[in-house]
Image (cartoon, rainbow, N blue to C red):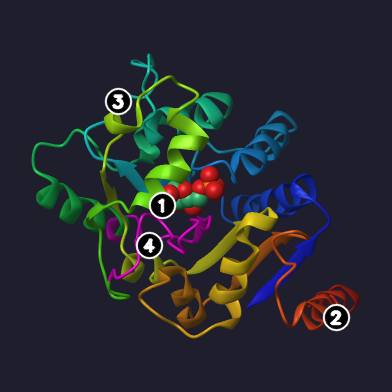
Amino acid sequence: MDIIIRENYEQMSKCAAEIIAGYVKAKPDCVLGLATGGTPIGTYRELIKMHREGLDFSQVRTFNLDEYLGVGIDLGKTYDLDQSYARFMYEELFKHINIKRENIYIPDGQTKDPKKFCMWYEQEIKKAGGIDLQLLGLGGDGHWGFNEPGSSLGSRTRVQALTEQTLDDNYEAFYKKANIARSQMPHFAITMGTGTILEAKNILMIVNGSKKADMVAKCLEGPITSQITATAIQLHSGDISVVLDQAAASKLKNSDHYKFVEKMKRQYGL
Ligand code: GLP
């Protein structure tokens, strides 16, 4: 696991975007797993800049981690008061790059048959040959995707009830600004499971801010537990990059070691 610590949010975002761009350049038809939330916005802005300078997304396929249940849209059609992750992705990334509509997969929050949909989603990931690189943030309660405390570490794509903490966090970050009452927020979501995430070939996790410093330390240096589902990152067998800003890294016990390893790897081109 490469733990990369950068000065601030901008540097973290640049570093993450460079990692993603590396995959796209090496394999133009790569499959990216994408994430939502405040954290990846800077990364997406960097990717948009890179696209304007020639980075080509025309063959890239994407699978988003999750979506609120009860919302979701035809990309680009319904926006008003819509806080769906489909809208988020469209606004923050897709409408700015040359990705093809048919190559974008986001869980359908409006599905009439969530169970069937979730099985279909898993199959589509397999049909695409699996996810080459999965981008992830870290929830305040230690979730990745929407895998809340207590979710099995082998879980697959499914419907998940959201915790009060997640509702609070996401209300503050998104719904409040859109003038939507907290009681009106979706309380359920469709999410890839931890088992699904662990099947991605490679993982890129990004976290910023001192509010998440404790959770980052638990996730990377604490015991693996279904109470903090992102601790399962320690079980992954592919390339793992965790890019943090200084504030998010501030509670790590071994940060000097991680910095040393990064310096050595750069020095020796590893
Ligand atoms: C949501 C998403 C997660 C994301 C988390 C963190 O709960 N389902 O995938 O990682 O928010 O969000 P933020 O980046 O806004 O802190």
Choose between 264 and 78: the one closer to the eye: 78
Residue ID at (44%, 60%): 144
Region in magenta:
126-151
The amino acid at mark 3 is Ile
Question: In the rendered image of this protein, does residue 241 appear above or below residue 122?
Answer: below
Crowd class of label 2 (few under 14; some 14 to 19; many from 20; radius 10 Å): few
Determine whether the beta carbon of the residue marked 1 sits less than 8 angstroms from the nearest atom of ligand 1. no
Residue 19 seen anywhere in this rendered image of the structure: no
Which type of secondary structure does the marked residue at label 2 adopt?
Answer: helix
Residue holding disc 1: 165
Residue 35 in the figure: left or right of residue 258: left
Residue 125 in the figure: left or right of residue 238: left
Q: CA distance from mark 4 to mark 1?
A: 31 Å
Picture disc at residue 73: 3
Write down the quadrant of residue 240 in the picture. Answer: bottom right
Which type of secondary structure does the marked residue at label 1 adopt?
Answer: helix
Which type of secondary structure does the marked residue at label 3 adopt?
Answer: loop
Residue 260, horizontal then vertical, whole percent: 85, 80
